[in-house]
Image: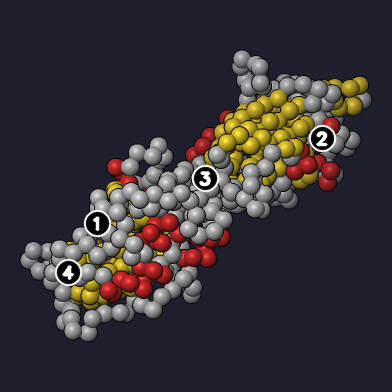
């Protein structure tokens, strides 16, 4: 169920090509060794970008159910490419819960504007398929009558819309909007207030008369793909929905979502260069971007400008774009488990530099030091092995940073290429930038190796 969603602009731009290709070289060079560089994306796949719990009704001092007239409220941050999903139990039942459909609730319109308003029409009553249904508020194993948690007859069924359920005792449930109201209020930036209200007149008409219909504490996630918590027509994933839908217990699902929350970072195509010792052809730490095309890679994963100019840069003897993942037939970013590879010839004294984007950011890129990596040691022996420790994350200083994967102008959320607030700061190690956001370590995203033949 783990899925990754990339921005349209990013996917469109990374496939751009230029006149140089991986076998460009200076014919006057007599190679001493042939090198192959592999750049592999090793970042863990995260199912959710944000997650959390709602368990204390507004005005209450401690966690508990939202009885008729009460509501849960919580804040979420979400980018244009993300959606909201949640699960809360319809108490007095065996295993019924409210939640959006498989796609979740979009928090932005197609034009990128944030939404505000009633979204109850995107919320449904589901049967978890884990416990045989009894008459709500009457059956001995409904949550308000059971002798203890997790009682009742196991069903081993599928998650279905309650309106499509045929197993167990039939019951005429009210319409969703007669029990619950869900609204989204845009606050500021990328922040939204989510309100889940148990309506004051929320009742269930049972054989023993009208009974109240409370809502349990629940869990929410902000996600990019579909089916984040369950799939209609399939069995429960076993990650904690059963505990919420049968007992209103958020413990297991909250632990699972917390463990699987974070940014899944792609890495963009890039450009490599072999150059003379003592030259900084791509950028210089502590100086503004040269304007040679590093900005295009750092902001959009767009290799066109730097790919076209790399062979004319100071000290460069060879250089080219790398943009097609190993085993793929077309250009694109490397997702977790995929890699780029390129090969070149070099001689003693040569250095290697390359740059490619840490996608989901505004202008952060991977790269060697500004002087590159020496391809031979002081004894003239060619370098081979894992060189990830010689790769750094850099801030290009060309666009104001926003929260990765959330900010509206990060590459996976922007509506078009080259958006965002311009800045003219120096190229800096990302570790020296204090923007208030969290970034991964290089070796948690990439593994870079070089092999000399």
Q: Nearer the viewer, mark 3 or mark 2?
A: 3
Looking at the figure, which quarter contains the C terminus? bottom left
Per the image, label 2 sits on a secondary structure element best described as: helix
Instruction: Point out the residue furthest to the top here.
Output: 61
Q: Are marks 1 and 2 in contact (CB under 8 Å)?
A: no
Per the image, label 3 sits on a secondary structure element best described as: loop
Q: Which residue is mark 2?
A: 177
Give the percent coordinates (x, y) of residue 419: 50, 54
Cα separation, mark 3 vs mark 1, equals: 29 Å
- At horizontal 72% and vertical 38% (from top left) the residue drawn is 117
* Disc ID at residue 276: 4
Q: Are marks 2 and 4 in contact (CB under 8 Å)?
A: no
- At horizontal 39% and vertical 49% (from top left) the residue drawn is 423
Cα separation, mark 2 vs mark 4, equals: 70 Å
Give the percent coordinates (x, y) of residue 414: 53, 53
Label 3 or label 2, whichever comes before in sequence order? 2
């Amino acid at each position: 169920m783990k899925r990754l969603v990339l921005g349209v602009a990013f996917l469109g731009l990374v496939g751009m090509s230029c006149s140089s290709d991986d076998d460009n070289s200076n014919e006057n060079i007599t190679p001493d060794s042939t090198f192959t560089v592999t750049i592999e994306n090793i970042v863990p796949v995260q199912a959710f970008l944000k997650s959390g719990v709602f368990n204390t009704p507004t005005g209450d001092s401690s966690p508990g159910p939202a009885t008729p007239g009460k509501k849960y409220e919580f804040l979420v941050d979400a980018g244009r490419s993300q959606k909201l999903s949640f699960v809360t139990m319809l108490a007095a039942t065996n295993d019924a819960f409210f939640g959006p459909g498989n796609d979740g609730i979009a928090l932005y319109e197609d034009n990128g504007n944030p939404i505000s308003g009633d979204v109850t029409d995107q919320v449904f009553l589901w049967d978890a398929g884990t416990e045989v249904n009894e008459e709500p508020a009457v059956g001995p194993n409904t949550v308000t009558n059971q002798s203890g948690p997790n009682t009742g007859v196991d069903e081993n069924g599928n998650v279905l819309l309650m309106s499509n359920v045929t197993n167990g005792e039939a019951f005429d449930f009210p319409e969703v909007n007669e029990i619950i109201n869900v609204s989204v209020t845009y606050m500021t930036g990328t922040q939204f207030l989510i309100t889940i209200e148990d309506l004051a007149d929320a009742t269930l008409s049972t054989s023993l008369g009208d009974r109240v219909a409370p809502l349990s504490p629940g869990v929410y996630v902000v996600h990019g793909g579909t089916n984040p918590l369950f799939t209609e027509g399939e069995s429960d994933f076993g990650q904690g929905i059963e505990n919420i839908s049968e007992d209103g217990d958020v413990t297991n699902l909250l632990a699972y979502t917390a463990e699987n929350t974070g940014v899944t970072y792609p890495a963009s195509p890039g450009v490599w260069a072999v150059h003379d010792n003592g030259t900084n052809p791509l950028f210089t730490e502590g100086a503004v971007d040269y304007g040679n095309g590093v900005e295009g890679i750092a902001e959009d994963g767009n290799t066109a400008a730097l790919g076209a100019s790399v062979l004319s840069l100071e000290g460069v003897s060879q250089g080219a774009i790398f943009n097609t993942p190993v085993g793929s037939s077309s250009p694109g970013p490397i997702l977790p488990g995929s890699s780029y590879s390129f090969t070149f010839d070099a001689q003693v004294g040569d250095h290697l530099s390359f740059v490619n984007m840490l996608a989901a950011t505004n202008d952060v890129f991977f790269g060697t030091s500004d002087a590159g990596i020496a391809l031979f040691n002081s004894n003239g022996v060619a370098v081979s092995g894992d060189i990830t420790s010689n790769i750094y994350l850099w801030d290009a200083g060309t666009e104001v940073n926003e929260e990765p994967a959330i900010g509206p102008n990060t590459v996976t959320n922007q509506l078009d290429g080259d958006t965002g607030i311009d800045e003219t700061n120096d190229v800096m190690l990302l570790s020296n930038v204090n923007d208030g956001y969290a970034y991964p370590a290089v070796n948690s995203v990439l593994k870079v190796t070089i092999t000399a033949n």
